[in-house]
Image (cartoon, helix red, strand yellow):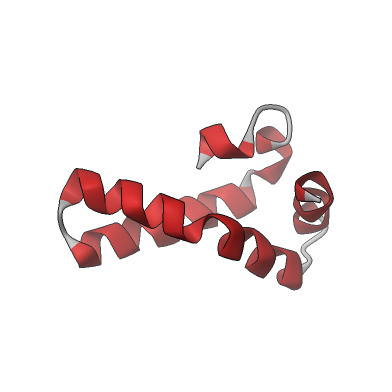
Amino acid sequence: MLKSVMAKIQKKDEESKRILFEMFHEQVYRKAYFITKDHYLAQDILQETFLKAFNHMDQIMKVSVHGYL
C-alpha cells in the first residue's frame, strides 16, 4: 500500500498526500517535539518535513520513506 500511495503522490494525487500524512504525522511530530521541546517548532518541522517529502517523492522511493521522515 505504501508504495502505491507514494507513486500516486508523484502524480500529484492530493488524497494520497493526506493518506501518507495520516500514516506518519504522529511519529514525525513526536520526534520533532522530543528534540525541540517546543510544540510550535515541532509543528513547523512537521510541516516542512512533509512538504519536502512530497516534493522529493521520486528520491524517497529509491530509499525508505521511514528513514526519510
Expressed as whole percent of the image width and height from the top left, the position of residue 1 reads 81, 51
Expressed as whole percent of the image width and height from the top left, the position of residue 23 reads 60, 58
Q: Is residue 5 left or right of residue 42?
A: right
Residue 5 drawn above or below residue 22? above
Q: Is residue 28 left or right of residue 6?
A: left
Question: Looking at the rendering, which quadrant does residue 9 occupy?
Answer: bottom right
How many marks the image carries: the answer is: 0
Of 35 and 59, nearer the camera is 35
Q: Residue at x 32, y 62 (%)?
A: 44
Q: Residue at x 42, y 51 (%)?
A: 28
Q: Residue at x 15, y 53 (%)?
A: 37
Furthest-left residue in this view: 37
Expressed as whole percent of the image width and height from the top left, the position of residue 48 reads 42, 56
Q: Is residue 21 left or right of residue 42?
A: right
Q: Is residue 39 left or right of residue 7?
A: left
Furthest-top residue in this view: 63
Q: Residue at x 78, y 52 (%)?
A: 10
Q: Is residue 32 visible?
A: yes
Residue 17 drawn above or below residue 15? above
Residue 66 drawn above or below residue 13? above
Expressed as whole percent of the image width and height from the top left, the position of residue 30 reads 33, 53
Q: Is residue 48 visible?
A: no
